[in-house]
Amino acid sequence: MNPELIRVNKAYEKHIALIQLNRPKELNALNLQVMGEIRDTLMELDNDPEVRVIIITGNERAFAAGADIKQMAGKGAIDMLKIDQFSTWDQIRKTKKPIIAAVSGFALGGGCELVMTCDMVVAAESAQFGQPEIKIGVMPGAGGTQRLPRAVGKVKAMEMALTGNFISAEEALNWGLINKVVPNESYLSEAVRLAKDIAKQSPIAVQLAKESVLKAYEMPLQEALSFERKNFYMLFATQDQKEGMAAFVEKRKPSFKGE
Ligand code: CAA
Protein backbone atom coordinates (compact mmCIF):
# COMPACT_ATOMS: atom_id res chain seq x y z
CA MET A 1 0.00 0.00 0.00
CA ASN A 2 1.36 3.41 -0.94
CA PRO A 3 1.38 5.41 2.32
CA GLU A 4 1.29 8.67 0.36
CA LEU A 5 -2.25 8.35 -0.98
CA ILE A 6 -4.14 7.83 2.26
CA ARG A 7 -2.99 7.91 5.87
CA VAL A 8 -4.54 5.43 8.24
CA ASN A 9 -4.49 5.59 12.04
CA LYS A 10 -6.30 2.57 13.48
CA ALA A 11 -6.23 3.96 17.01
CA TYR A 12 -6.69 7.71 16.50
CA GLU A 13 -8.74 7.62 19.70
CA LYS A 14 -9.94 4.62 21.65
CA HIS A 15 -12.09 2.51 19.27
CA ILE A 16 -11.90 5.24 16.60
CA ALA A 17 -9.92 4.88 13.35
CA LEU A 18 -9.04 7.76 11.05
CA ILE A 19 -8.54 7.63 7.29
CA GLN A 20 -7.06 10.80 5.83
CA LEU A 21 -7.00 11.35 2.08
CA ASN A 22 -3.54 12.53 1.19
CA ARG A 23 -3.24 13.98 -2.30
CA PRO A 24 -3.22 17.64 -1.24
CA LYS A 25 -1.77 19.00 -4.52
CA GLU A 26 -4.62 17.38 -6.48
CA LEU A 27 -7.24 18.46 -3.91
CA ASN A 28 -7.56 14.78 -2.94
CA ALA A 29 -8.89 13.82 -6.38
CA LEU A 30 -10.07 10.24 -6.12
CA ASN A 31 -8.08 8.18 -8.56
CA LEU A 32 -8.42 4.41 -8.90
CA GLN A 33 -5.57 3.74 -6.48
CA VAL A 34 -7.02 5.99 -3.75
CA MET A 35 -10.45 4.40 -4.04
CA GLY A 36 -8.91 0.93 -3.95
CA GLU A 37 -6.96 1.80 -0.82
CA ILE A 38 -10.03 3.27 0.86
CA ARG A 39 -11.98 0.11 0.07
CA ASP A 40 -9.22 -2.23 1.31
CA THR A 41 -8.70 -0.18 4.47
CA LEU A 42 -12.41 -0.13 5.29
CA MET A 43 -12.56 -3.92 4.89
CA GLU A 44 -9.58 -4.27 7.21
CA LEU A 45 -11.01 -1.89 9.81
CA ASP A 46 -14.37 -3.68 9.63
CA ASN A 47 -12.58 -6.87 10.71
CA ASP A 48 -10.60 -5.22 13.53
CA PRO A 49 -12.46 -5.76 16.82
CA GLU A 50 -10.74 -2.76 18.44
CA VAL A 51 -12.28 -0.37 15.89
CA ARG A 52 -15.88 0.71 16.46
CA VAL A 53 -16.19 3.91 14.39
CA ILE A 54 -14.31 5.12 11.32
CA ILE A 55 -13.74 8.76 10.36
CA ILE A 56 -12.80 9.76 6.81
CA THR A 57 -11.32 13.20 6.31
CA GLY A 58 -9.23 15.25 3.91
CA ASN A 59 -7.42 18.48 4.69
CA GLU A 60 -8.50 22.09 5.28
CA ARG A 61 -8.69 22.96 1.58
CA ALA A 62 -10.37 19.83 0.29
CA PHE A 63 -12.17 16.75 1.46
CA ALA A 64 -12.02 15.58 -2.17
CA ALA A 65 -12.58 17.51 -5.43
CA GLY A 66 -14.04 14.50 -7.22
CA ALA A 67 -12.92 11.58 -9.30
CA ASP A 68 -9.55 12.18 -10.95
CA ILE A 69 -10.45 14.00 -14.17
CA LYS A 70 -6.93 13.67 -15.54
CA GLN A 71 -7.06 9.88 -15.11
CA MET A 72 -10.45 9.67 -16.85
CA ALA A 73 -10.04 12.28 -19.59
CA GLY A 74 -8.63 10.03 -22.32
CA LYS A 75 -10.79 6.98 -21.64
CA GLY A 76 -13.46 5.53 -23.94
CA ALA A 77 -16.78 4.03 -22.87
CA ILE A 78 -15.50 0.45 -23.06
CA ASP A 79 -12.41 1.36 -21.00
CA MET A 80 -14.74 2.83 -18.37
CA LEU A 81 -16.96 -0.25 -18.48
CA LYS A 82 -13.98 -2.58 -18.08
CA ILE A 83 -12.36 -0.58 -15.29
CA ASP A 84 -15.78 -0.09 -13.62
CA GLN A 85 -14.15 2.18 -11.08
CA PHE A 86 -17.35 3.20 -9.36
CA SER A 87 -18.09 -0.38 -8.28
CA THR A 88 -15.63 0.37 -5.45
CA TRP A 89 -18.37 2.56 -3.96
CA ASP A 90 -20.59 -0.53 -3.57
CA GLN A 91 -17.97 -2.15 -1.38
CA ILE A 92 -17.64 1.00 0.75
CA ARG A 93 -21.40 0.95 1.25
CA LYS A 94 -21.06 -2.60 2.65
CA THR A 95 -18.88 -1.47 5.58
CA LYS A 96 -20.66 -2.63 8.73
CA LYS A 97 -19.17 -0.10 11.12
CA PRO A 98 -20.37 3.49 11.09
CA ILE A 99 -18.37 5.94 8.99
CA ILE A 100 -18.30 9.68 9.69
CA ALA A 101 -17.10 12.13 7.04
CA ALA A 102 -15.24 15.11 8.53
CA VAL A 103 -15.35 17.68 5.74
CA SER A 104 -13.45 20.90 5.19
CA GLY A 105 -13.18 22.74 1.88
CA PHE A 106 -14.30 21.11 -1.37
CA ALA A 107 -16.48 17.99 -1.42
CA LEU A 108 -17.29 17.81 -5.12
CA GLY A 109 -18.39 15.17 -7.59
CA GLY A 110 -17.02 11.86 -6.34
CA GLY A 111 -16.00 13.72 -3.15
CA CYS A 112 -19.63 14.64 -2.47
CA GLU A 113 -20.63 11.09 -3.40
CA LEU A 114 -18.07 9.69 -0.96
CA VAL A 115 -19.56 11.96 1.71
CA MET A 116 -23.02 10.56 0.93
CA THR A 117 -21.73 6.99 1.15
CA CYS A 118 -20.66 7.76 4.72
CA ASP A 119 -23.25 7.51 7.49
CA MET A 120 -22.88 10.93 9.11
CA VAL A 121 -21.22 14.18 8.12
CA VAL A 122 -19.60 16.94 10.17
CA ALA A 123 -18.51 19.95 8.12
CA ALA A 124 -16.41 23.06 8.65
CA GLU A 125 -18.04 26.41 7.80
CA SER A 126 -15.68 26.56 4.79
CA ALA A 127 -17.03 23.34 3.29
CA GLN A 128 -18.59 23.43 -0.18
CA PHE A 129 -20.58 20.60 -1.67
CA GLY A 130 -21.45 20.06 -5.31
CA GLN A 131 -21.95 17.71 -8.24
CA PRO A 132 -20.14 19.69 -10.95
CA GLU A 133 -19.76 16.80 -13.42
CA ILE A 134 -22.22 18.53 -15.77
CA LYS A 135 -19.62 21.28 -16.29
CA ILE A 136 -17.17 18.75 -17.76
CA GLY A 137 -19.72 17.18 -20.08
CA VAL A 138 -20.77 14.20 -17.97
CA MET A 139 -22.98 13.50 -14.97
CA PRO A 140 -22.59 12.06 -11.46
CA GLY A 141 -21.69 8.38 -11.69
CA ALA A 142 -21.10 7.19 -8.14
CA GLY A 143 -24.45 7.79 -6.50
CA GLY A 144 -24.97 11.52 -7.04
CA THR A 145 -28.26 11.15 -8.91
CA GLN A 146 -29.53 8.56 -6.40
CA ARG A 147 -28.27 9.36 -2.91
CA LEU A 148 -28.53 13.13 -3.38
CA PRO A 149 -32.32 13.20 -4.06
CA ARG A 150 -32.84 10.82 -1.13
CA ALA A 151 -30.95 13.29 1.07
CA VAL A 152 -32.13 16.69 -0.20
CA GLY A 153 -35.21 15.91 -2.32
CA LYS A 154 -35.77 16.00 -6.07
CA VAL A 155 -35.74 19.69 -6.89
CA LYS A 156 -32.56 20.55 -5.02
CA ALA A 157 -30.80 17.44 -6.36
CA MET A 158 -31.86 18.48 -9.88
CA GLU A 159 -30.47 21.97 -9.32
CA MET A 160 -27.13 20.63 -8.11
CA ALA A 161 -26.76 17.96 -10.79
CA LEU A 162 -27.97 20.12 -13.70
CA THR A 163 -26.20 23.39 -12.89
CA GLY A 164 -23.10 22.01 -11.17
CA ASN A 165 -23.31 24.91 -8.72
CA PHE A 166 -21.82 24.42 -5.27
CA ILE A 167 -23.71 24.82 -2.01
CA SER A 168 -22.28 26.09 1.26
CA ALA A 169 -22.03 24.09 4.48
CA GLU A 170 -24.95 26.09 5.86
CA GLU A 171 -27.12 25.22 2.86
CA ALA A 172 -26.03 21.58 3.05
CA LEU A 173 -27.14 21.57 6.68
CA ASN A 174 -30.50 23.18 5.93
CA TRP A 175 -31.04 20.82 2.98
CA GLY A 176 -30.43 17.71 5.09
CA LEU A 177 -27.16 16.62 3.48
CA ILE A 178 -25.02 16.89 6.60
CA ASN A 179 -25.39 16.59 10.39
CA LYS A 180 -23.67 19.74 11.60
CA VAL A 181 -21.59 22.76 10.69
CA VAL A 182 -18.83 23.82 13.06
CA PRO A 183 -16.08 26.45 13.11
CA ASN A 184 -13.29 25.69 10.65
CA GLU A 185 -10.79 24.67 13.29
CA SER A 186 -13.03 22.08 14.95
CA TYR A 187 -14.48 19.90 12.19
CA LEU A 188 -12.25 16.94 13.07
CA SER A 189 -12.62 17.27 16.85
CA GLU A 190 -16.43 17.49 16.44
CA ALA A 191 -16.38 14.36 14.28
CA VAL A 192 -14.36 12.64 17.02
CA ARG A 193 -16.89 13.80 19.62
CA LEU A 194 -19.70 12.27 17.58
CA ALA A 195 -17.63 9.09 17.07
CA LYS A 196 -17.04 8.80 20.84
CA ASP A 197 -20.79 9.00 21.50
CA ILE A 198 -21.23 6.04 19.15
CA ALA A 199 -18.13 4.11 20.30
CA LYS A 200 -19.44 3.87 23.86
CA GLN A 201 -22.61 2.06 22.73
CA SER A 202 -22.90 -1.68 22.10
CA PRO A 203 -21.01 -2.23 18.83
CA ILE A 204 -23.32 -5.05 17.76
CA ALA A 205 -26.39 -2.88 18.34
CA VAL A 206 -24.71 -0.03 16.45
CA GLN A 207 -23.95 -2.33 13.53
CA LEU A 208 -27.49 -3.69 13.30
CA ALA A 209 -29.01 -0.23 13.71
CA LYS A 210 -26.86 1.07 10.84
CA GLU A 211 -27.86 -1.89 8.70
CA SER A 212 -31.54 -1.25 9.43
CA VAL A 213 -31.39 2.50 8.71
CA LEU A 214 -29.78 1.81 5.33
CA LYS A 215 -32.62 -0.58 4.48
CA ALA A 216 -34.97 2.40 4.66
CA TYR A 217 -33.49 3.45 1.32
CA GLU A 218 -33.40 0.06 -0.28
CA MET A 219 -36.54 -1.89 0.69
CA PRO A 220 -40.29 -1.36 0.62
CA LEU A 221 -41.57 -0.26 4.05
CA GLN A 222 -43.23 -3.51 5.15
CA GLU A 223 -40.14 -5.60 4.36
CA ALA A 224 -37.87 -3.05 5.97
CA LEU A 225 -40.00 -3.00 9.14
CA SER A 226 -39.81 -6.77 9.31
CA PHE A 227 -36.02 -6.61 8.78
CA GLU A 228 -35.74 -4.04 11.58
CA ARG A 229 -37.83 -6.16 13.94
CA LYS A 230 -35.64 -9.22 13.40
CA ASN A 231 -32.49 -7.21 14.08
CA PHE A 232 -34.12 -5.91 17.27
CA TYR A 233 -35.02 -9.44 18.44
CA MET A 234 -31.56 -10.72 17.51
CA LEU A 235 -29.94 -8.24 19.91
CA PHE A 236 -31.54 -10.16 22.78
CA ALA A 237 -28.89 -12.82 22.10
CA THR A 238 -26.13 -10.40 23.17
CA GLN A 239 -24.55 -9.86 26.57
CA ASP A 240 -24.70 -6.14 25.80
CA GLN A 241 -28.52 -6.25 25.83
CA LYS A 242 -28.47 -7.94 29.26
CA GLU A 243 -25.91 -5.42 30.50
CA GLY A 244 -27.70 -2.38 29.02
CA MET A 245 -31.09 -3.23 30.48
CA ALA A 246 -29.66 -4.37 33.85
CA ALA A 247 -27.69 -1.11 34.10
CA PHE A 248 -30.89 0.87 33.47
CA VAL A 249 -32.76 -1.02 36.21
CA GLU A 250 -29.82 -0.70 38.62
CA LYS A 251 -29.46 3.02 37.81
CA ARG A 252 -25.80 2.77 36.70
CA LYS A 253 -23.89 3.32 33.46
CA PRO A 254 -23.66 0.27 31.19
CA SER A 255 -20.33 -1.19 30.15
CA PHE A 256 -20.66 -2.72 26.70
CA LYS A 257 -18.18 -5.37 25.58
CA GLY A 258 -19.38 -6.12 22.06
CA GLU A 259 -20.51 -9.62 23.01
N1 CAA B 1 -9.27 15.63 -10.81
C1 CAA B 1 -7.97 15.84 -11.06
N2 CAA B 1 -7.29 16.94 -10.66
C2 CAA B 1 -7.97 17.85 -9.94
C3 CAA B 1 -9.33 17.72 -9.64
C4 CAA B 1 -9.99 16.53 -10.10
N3 CAA B 1 -11.28 16.26 -9.83
N4 CAA B 1 -9.74 18.79 -8.95
C5 CAA B 1 -8.66 19.58 -8.81
N5 CAA B 1 -7.58 19.03 -9.42
C6 CAA B 1 -6.22 19.56 -9.51
C7 CAA B 1 -6.14 20.70 -10.51
O1 CAA B 1 -6.03 20.20 -11.81
C8 CAA B 1 -4.92 21.41 -10.02
O2 CAA B 1 -3.79 20.70 -10.47
P1 CAA B 1 -2.54 21.51 -11.14
O3 CAA B 1 -2.00 22.35 -10.01
O4 CAA B 1 -1.62 20.41 -11.56
O5 CAA B 1 -3.10 22.31 -12.24
C9 CAA B 1 -4.99 21.26 -8.51
O6 CAA B 1 -5.86 20.14 -8.27
C10 CAA B 1 -5.57 22.48 -7.81
O7 CAA B 1 -6.81 22.78 -8.42
P2 CAA B 1 -7.17 24.24 -9.02
O8 CAA B 1 -5.92 24.95 -9.44
O9 CAA B 1 -8.23 24.05 -10.04
O10 CAA B 1 -7.73 24.94 -7.70
P3 CAA B 1 -8.83 26.10 -7.62
O11 CAA B 1 -8.86 26.53 -6.18
O12 CAA B 1 -8.62 27.13 -8.66
O13 CAA B 1 -10.23 25.36 -7.97
C11 CAA B 1 -11.87 23.61 -7.81
C12 CAA B 1 -10.72 24.38 -7.13
C13 CAA B 1 -13.08 24.54 -7.99
C14 CAA B 1 -12.24 22.45 -6.90
C15 CAA B 1 -11.40 23.08 -9.20
O14 CAA B 1 -10.16 22.40 -9.03
C16 CAA B 1 -12.36 22.15 -9.85
O15 CAA B 1 -13.35 22.57 -10.42
N6 CAA B 1 -12.07 20.81 -9.80
C17 CAA B 1 -12.85 19.82 -10.47
C18 CAA B 1 -14.16 19.53 -9.75
C19 CAA B 1 -14.99 18.52 -10.52
O16 CAA B 1 -15.38 18.72 -11.65
N7 CAA B 1 -15.24 17.34 -9.89
C20 CAA B 1 -15.99 16.26 -10.50
C21 CAA B 1 -15.05 15.26 -11.11
S1 CAA B 1 -15.88 14.00 -12.06
C22 CAA B 1 -16.55 12.95 -10.91
O17 CAA B 1 -16.35 13.10 -9.74
C23 CAA B 1 -17.39 11.82 -11.44
C24 CAA B 1 -18.17 11.07 -10.42
O18 CAA B 1 -19.37 11.16 -10.35
C25 CAA B 1 -17.50 10.16 -9.48
Image (tube, grey):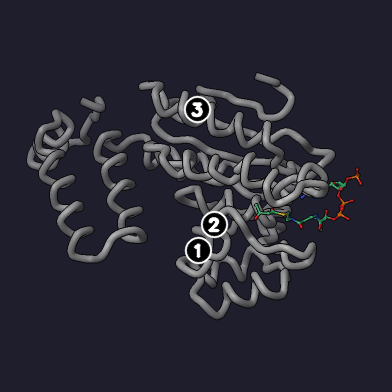
Q: Is the CB atom of the residue marked by disc 2 within 8 angstroms of ligand 1's nearest atom?
A: yes
Q: Residues within 10 Å of mark 2 (few under 14, many from 20)?
A: some
Give how far apart the Cα atoms at labels 1 and 3 are: 33 Å
As displayed, is residue 7 above or below residue 91? Answer: above
| Residue 5 place in picture, x, y as percent | 71, 29
Q: Which residue is mark 3?
A: 13
Outermost residue, bottom side? 155
| Residue 122 place in picture, x, y as percent | 55, 52
Q: Amino acid at mark 3?
A: Glu
Q: Could you say whether the residue bearing mark 3 is in a helix, strand or loop?
A: strand
Which of the two labelled residues, at mark 3 and mark 2, occupies the earlier sequence position? 3
Q: Amino acid at mark 1?
A: Gln
Marking on residue 146 = 1
Marking on residue 129 = none
Contact (CB < 8 A) between labels 2 and 1? Answer: yes
Determine which quarter of the picture holds residue 1.
top right
Q: Amino acid at mark 2?
A: Gly
Q: Residues within 10 Å of mark 1 (few under 14, many from 20)?
A: some
As displayed, is residue 60 above or below residue 181? Answer: above
Left or right, 33 with reference to 255: right
**Which numbered mark, 1 or 3, is in the foreground of this view?**
1
Which of the two labelled residues, at mark 1 and mark 3, occupies the earlier sequence position? 3
As displayed, is residue 4 above or below residue 116? Answer: above
Marking on residue 143 = 2
Determine which quarter of the picture holds residue 68.
top right
Q: What is the total number of numbered labels drawn onto the structure image?
A: 3
Give how far apart the Cα atoms at labels 2 and 1 are: 5 Å
